[in-house]
Image (spheres, rainbow, N blue to C red):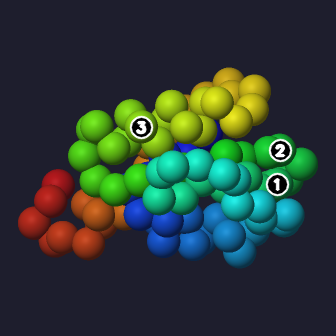
Amino acid sequence: LLVAAESREFDGLRRLAAGWKKLDSRIAMLAACEVDGRTWILAANGAGPALAAEAARSGLGNGNVDRVISMGTCGALADTLA
């Protein structure tokens, strides 16, 4: 399960993925795809810990999840962040 604030943070993975499928959910974006024979669940629901937790809960309810990875690009956009 990959959790990000914005769905665009998954754009790089989209180029590698097959079978992209949107999943029903009340969060902003929940989808599943295949990469190298493995199923990935992708959840995006906005910035902040409460929305990230809601995204993780939604993703965990959609399959056999063995890892949860929080990812994003925001810090990469600011030169002042270490």
Residue identifier under label 2? 38
The tag on residue 54 is: 3
Using residue 1 as the reference point, say whether residue 80 is left or right of it.
left
Residue 41 % position (x, y): 67, 46
Q: Splitting the image into 4 quarters, where does residue 12 fall?
A: bottom right
Element assignment for label 1: strand
Tell us which disc is closer to us: 1 or 3.
3
> Which kind of residue does numbered mark 1 sit on?
Glu
Locate residue 1 relative to residue 3 in the image: left or right. Answer: right
Element on which disc 3 rests: helix
Q: Residue at 38% of width from left, 34% of height from top?
A: 53
What's the amino acid at mark 3? Glu
Q: Residues within 10 Å of mark 1 (few under 14, many from 20)?
A: some
Image location of residue 74, percent across then percent down: 29, 63
> Label 1, label 3: how many angstroms apart (C-alpha)?
23 Å
Residue 34 numbered mark, or none: 1
Q: Residues within 10 Å of mark 2 (few under 14, many from 20)?
A: few
